[in-house]
Image (tube, rainbow, N blue to C red):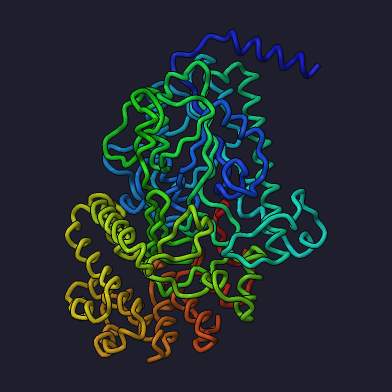
Amino acid sequence: MRLLTALCLLFVSSFSVAADRPNIVWIVSEDNSIHYLKHFFPGGAETPAIEAMAAHGLTFDNAFSNAPVCSVARTTLATMCYGPRIGTQFHRRYKSPPLPDGVRMFPEYLRKAGYYTTNNSKTDYNAEAGKEVWDESSNKASWRNRPDAKQPFFHMQSHAQSHESSLHFNEQTYKNVKTKHDPAKVQPGAHLPDTPLFRYTHALYLDKQQVIDDIVAQTVADLQKDGLLEDTFIFYFGDHGGVLPRGKGYVYDTGLHVPLVIRVPEHFKNLVEGADLGARVPGFVQFIDFGATALQLAGVPLPHGIDGRAFLGKGVPIKDVNERDEAFGYANRMDEKYDFVRTLRKGKYQYIRSFEPWLPDGLHNNYRYKMLAYEEWRQLWKDGKFSGAPAQFFERKPVEMLFDCEADPWTVKNLATDPAHAATLQDLRGRLQQQMRSMPDLSYYPESYLAAHAMDNPVAFGQKHLDEIRQLADIADLMLRPFAEARLGIEAALKSDVPMQRYWGAMVCTAFGKDAAPLTDLVRPLLNDPSEIVRVRALEFLGSLDVMNPQPALTDIVNKTADPVLAVEALNSVVWFKDHFAGKYSVKRSDFHPLVKGGDVDDRLNYINGVPYPPNAGAKKKKGKK
């Protein structure tokens, strides 16, 4: 009976009349990098449905999210713009900026061109979406709801079965629930401890990937049942990196390199120029490009003011796509955890620039540490049970890192100080500097400053302050030089009349650490700076040198400010000093009586108080999954 049904479906599909324009379906698995699919990476899960799509389409071996967390990544997908340029780079924004003049989220262009646009159902945007993006966005949204069966459609569906929360199991589950994949046969990444818990966590995640594969199979079957399969481009991809520790939330390859397979419909093969079905595409594509590609496939002109370029569609030869070999990535605040990191992947090399290198990757983040593997990792580190690659997560970061992602797929061997790679380092450093200055990258200002001064129109703010941003970038780049060469520039910044120059002067001092100790007397006056965030940066430097206990002054800023963003920025430093200075700078929850409460502030204070996450009643909970 099943065979007869399948034959009937194929008969109907083969004789259906091709539409004038293709339909487009995006199947998105949450929190999933290439490292968990055998189709892309050794040791990954078998995914027959995704592989069947690839056999009738294209596999993109170098697809990258621009950010390693959902709200920032999804905003990049929707807007086709780099987050640090348009003010959407912080996870779960404190203030939603408007989109740049003349730019709308890409489904709105499709809708105005006659497409039926549906989303099932995650949005999680950091910008104001507008009311014209979706015909329907809900857990019931489907192409099947369109009023005219001949109307072309764009449909996006997100699946949380692979989400980070799927690994938030407890000890009882760990002890009693078996995984389909054998933990003894999986191999944790070289950056992770090899323990039974890490192996179990890895095996469970491979199981989740196969659940996603079943969903892909069902979606393909639904399109075939409706006689739409050969009129529809089907994209399968992950929305950013996977969630084994040091994946999601971090700009290493494990946080940004996503699987992308596109099934090409028979009736629109002409829109794939220069590639046979079943081919693997080595050219680099980024999330900024995905919306542009949907528009190109639909024959909709690309708007001005976006950063993305189409990688399929009429007039886009695959040979040109294969000449692309760069991807830009960024990370700022992830929930309550701050950092400022940028990356450029070019060919097989990944260059990572840390602008706050004193902050370890392992700095506490409540949502990350719900995972037992994260907790075990930290405890093993505290107990001194490992060194080398697994210990790097809890140590200061180098200002620059360079990895050969082909020879070192888990990115643990930093080549930045290897003379044999000096030319590559200099080339990628220069390219990233140019990228950040030309945008310009708004994160040269702290989030509290941007929230107060830039969010009414971030793009206009960036253009108006372009020269100042480049001056701040020059100060930040002093940490790339030997201290003796950088000293005069740092001194000038610390003495500047411009608050943000003093801010970066103090930041560069902290990056140099003990080497910058001769500048202690120039930093001390900043403890009384009119700018509170400058005071925070001065406290970080002086506290890191053990010149003073920074916690009372940081606590005072948290307690007195009416700015929730500044409070979270200061609490980031509080937790760094609490956890990474051998108990020297302890704090108690009773020390804090903040004017602002809820959200990230409560998350930090509950952690200090030892309250498990999610916090108990009384604390404001955020909407949605992280």
Quadrant of the image occupied by residue 589 = bottom right
* Residue occupying the point 63% across, 67% down: 193
Q: Is residue 412 left or right of residue 83?
A: right
Quadrant of the image occupied by residue 129 = top left
Q: Position of residue 107 (x, y in %)?
A: 42, 32
Q: Is residue 573 left or right of residue 53?
A: left
Q: Count every numbered label the image shows and give the total.
A: 0
Q: Position of residue 449 (x, y in %)?
A: 31, 65
Q: 422 above or below 576? A: above
Image quarter (top left, top right, bottom left or bottom right) of the C terminus: bottom right
* Residue occupying the point 33% across, 74% down: 533
Q: 440 above or below 417? A: above
* Residue occupying the point 24% across, 86% down: 522
- Front position in the image: 622 or 100: 100
Q: Position of residue 564 (x, y in %)?
A: 42, 67
Image quarter (top left, top right, bottom left or bottom right) of the N terminus: top right
Q: 187 above or below 310? A: below
Residue 136 shows in this picture: no
- Front position in the image: 448 or 270: 270
Q: Is residue 29 left or right of residue 341?
A: right
Q: Position of residue 9 (x, y in %)?
A: 67, 14
From this viewpoint, which residue is outermost toward the front?
Answer: 420
Residue 377 shows in this picture: yes
Q: 242 above or below 288? A: below
Quadrant of the image occupied by residue 610 = bottom right
* Residue occupying the point 44% across, 51% down: 72
